[in-house]
Image (cartoon, rainbow, N blue to C red):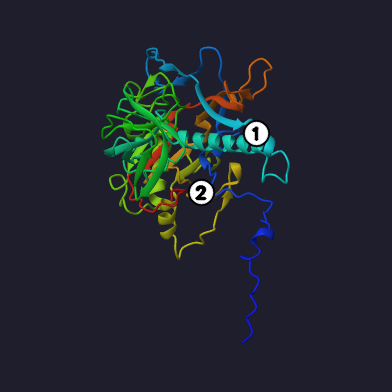
Amino acid sequence: MADTPQLITDATISGVLKNVYAAFRENTFPIATPLLAQLKKGKPGGPERMQWGGNGVYWDVKLTRPVGMNGSQLGYFPPHAVVTEQQANVGIKRTYVTRQIDALADSGTQSREAAFVNITRKIVEEALDAARLGQQEILHGDGLGIKGVTTTVSSSTSVVVTKPYGIASSGQGGLLIDVGMYVAVVDSTGATVRGRSTISAVSNSGDSATVTFATAIAGMLTTDLVVAASTSDTSYNQVPNGLTNMLNRGGSYNNLHGIDAGTYARWDGIRLTAGTDTDDASQPTEMDVWKLIRVVAGKSGKDAQMTPSEFLLLTTPGLVKKIGETFLGQRRWDMGMRTLQGGFGALELCGLPVISDYWCPAGTIYLIHTPSLSWVDKMDWTKLVFEGAGPWRFIAGRDAYEVDFGAYWNTCVLNRICNGMLVGYTDTQRFSHVV
């Protein structure tokens, strides 16, 4: 019986086979920053842009109603009256991103045949993406920089985290937390630093995230806070303002820009609560938004239905879906589409664009008057250099380089009462980047 010839397979000739590499590179993380795109660039009818310098930026705010008219049969004038005015002010915050590169890696990626992308260009692109995502996160916060709150301490290297931005029921615990971040765990006041570590693993389950630290952190307690950090300090209370404190979410941020809403009632955002100020906390409707518009218009004189180009609505994809469900059978889902700054598409509700933003705290609809917001900066994201020195610097004792990116900026609200929010909706569907 003749032998059966052996077939030649990939396994038998593996030594002569080549790897085939495609000439493209894919990013699996969505760089979605809709709120940042609306607020960063000042334009007519949009956010103001102010340049920081000296002792900070100051502006004048009129905080009481003009009064003083009378009627008199005998021709007597009324007593003198004056509007109360105060100076608001805002300082600057410094934010940074650092990247390091081995000199050999740089040399080995110069040619197109050797690498998908030059390592230097890769690092710069990723650093700027990290900066954009960090700014988007900050703009929804309150200036404290809270990424999450611990609810369970399993060990010195493992905790369960919830409450992005430190806000209850605000979304997935891992919304602001990911592998590779260098963070600190601080107590609820930010005064005591429990320790610092790189995050080595994150496991998301619903609105909780189990975070694993590469380095043990002793003494952690429930209600501790997770914040970004350097090896020398933490970011607690060191990041720019966000919508949470600028619009006084929950009434917990009365004092802003040197003016206190406890003293001047008109220095406050408008807050409505779903289920209390609306018919149903489980179902947002167009009439809920109409009511918010009317309350803001009555108290501030800024009417979104008269000047819709000055306003926008910002909420989560889950609430956009719920609102859309109330329109089924009444209108087309694509009706009234509008393109906003940054190329983001928006539906229209009560004549206003609705931005769907998964960074937004869950259960929230913001009504934002863009001309009353301001972007304050001294320096946009750039490589940090000193008097003509190059941005890439040797790392002491290593054949490697480091580049640092920095931005000096802040955000502020020129007139708080022109903005409002609806909070407390049941919002359980998460259309976010968290996996």
- Image quarter (top left, top right, bottom left or bottom right) of the N terminus: bottom right
For disc 1, the neighbor class at 10 Å (few under 14, some 14 to 19, many from 20) is few
Please say if 404 is above or below 365: above
**Residue 203: which numbered mark, if any?**
none
Q: Amino acid at mark 2?
A: Gly
Residue at screen point 31% across, 23% down = 192
The residue pinned by badge 1 equals 104
How far across and down, in percent of the image, does residue 339 sit? Answer: 59, 48
Across and down, in percent, residue 162 comes to 33, 41
Decide which of 72, 278 is in the foreground and name it.
278
344 and 153: which is toward the camera = 153
Mark drawn on residue 351: 2
Q: CA distance from mark 2 to mark 1?
A: 57 Å
* Dot 2: element: loop
Q: Which of the two discs, 2 and 1, sits closer to the camera? A: 1
Up-down relation of residue 314 to residue 98 (above or below) = below
Mark 2: few/some/many CA within 10 Å (<14, 14-19, 20+): some
Residue drawn at 64 percent across, 85 percent down: 2
Most distant residue in the bottom direction: 1
Q: Is residue 102 left or right of residue 258?
A: right
Q: Is residue 387 above or below residue 196?
A: above
Residue 412 in percent (x, y) is at 48, 27
Which tag, 2 or 1, sits closer to the chain's start? 1
Element class at badge 1: helix
Q: Residue at x 45, y 36 (%)?
A: 181
In this view of the protein, which residue sits in the foreground, 96 or 320?
96
Q: Is residue 333 above or below residue 24?
A: below
